[in-house]
Image (tube, rainbow, N blue to C red):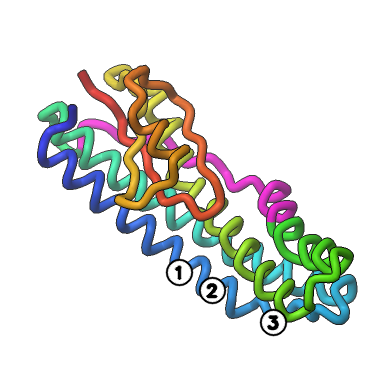
Amino acid sequence: MATQAGVLLTEAHRLAQAKLSAEVVADLLKVWPLLDPNALDATVDRWLTASHAIVAKKHGDSAALAREYLRRFRAVELGTPITAWTPPAAPAAAIDAIRTSLVVQGPVRIKAAMVARTPLEQAVQTAAGTSSAAGSRHALTGGRDTITEAAKVDERAQGLRRVTSGDSCKFCSMLATRTDFTYEFKAHDGCHCQSQPVYL
């Protein structure tokens, strides 16, 4: 188990990433009107360009938060100076994966809903939410991947432990109970879980 100081640092980090997630969603909803539901093919590029830029920027912000968290968490857990270890650089954002998720959960979902005879207004509102949630997941991947890759190269780390919010889904709650620490972290759209390095 982590020290009390470590637990507090991890929760502060989880909340900081959750705040960033909310910012991503808000920013994506602001540019959502760039996508005209009556002219999806003609407006998808301008919407996707603006949306991708938001996600990519927040991906970097998420990674920066994680690197600072890692430095502080490792120091309190191992009783070493905060300057004794520097986390590796964060992995680059997966451009193609981000764009694919945004499109599939946005305009593609609208088209599918229209085929199913869903009212246009309802289809657009649903797609705005699903696309924003996908964008949030990709943004938070910046921090999650940073922690994962750092734990892999840290000779003192024994793996990762999942840290959930108070209202996590059954899937995340189940993963959080595992005692076989791994270096993998799965997150779904809308997920606010984070990982914590394990030092024994």
Q: Is mark 2 on a helix, strand or loop?
A: helix
Label 3 Cα crowd, 10 Å radius (few <14 / some 14-19 / many 20+)? few
Q: Can residue 56 be seen in this view?
A: no
Q: Earlier in the sequence, mark 2 or mark 3?
A: 2
Q: Which amino acid does label 3 sit on?
A: Pro
Residue that numbered label 1 is attached to: 23
Question: Residue 117 appears in which quarter of the rendering?
Answer: bottom right
**Residue on which disc 3 sits:** 33
Q: Is residue 100 magenta?
A: yes
Above or below 150: residue 99: below
Say above or below: 185 vs 18: above
**Residue 20: percent from the left, percent from the top?**
41, 62
Q: Distance between the residues labelled 2 and 3?
A: 11 Å
Q: In this view, does 3 lie to the left or right of 200?
A: left
- Expressed as whole percent of the image width and height from the top left, the position of residue 76 reads 14, 35
User: Could one spot residue 127 in this view of the protein?
Assistant: yes
Q: What element carries label 1?
A: helix
Q: Residue at x 80, y 65 (%)?
A: 113
Residue at the spot x=40%, y=32% of the render? Answer: 174
Residue type for callout 2: Asp
Res 27 label: 2
Please tell me whether mark 3 sits on a helix, a strand or a loop.
helix
| 1 and 3 marks in contact (CB < 8 Å) | no
Amino acid type at circle 1 is Glu
Judging depth in this view, the residue of 79 and 148 nearest the camera is: 148
Residue located farthest toward the front when viewing the structure as drawn: 117
Which residue is pictured at 29% across the width and 39% down the height?
70
**Chain part drawn in magenta:** 83-101
Q: Residues within 10 Å of mark 2 (few under 14, many from 20)?
A: some
* Cβ atoms under marks 2 and 1 closer than 8 Å: yes
Q: Does the magenta stretch include residue 71?
A: no
Image quadrant holding the N terminus, namely: top left
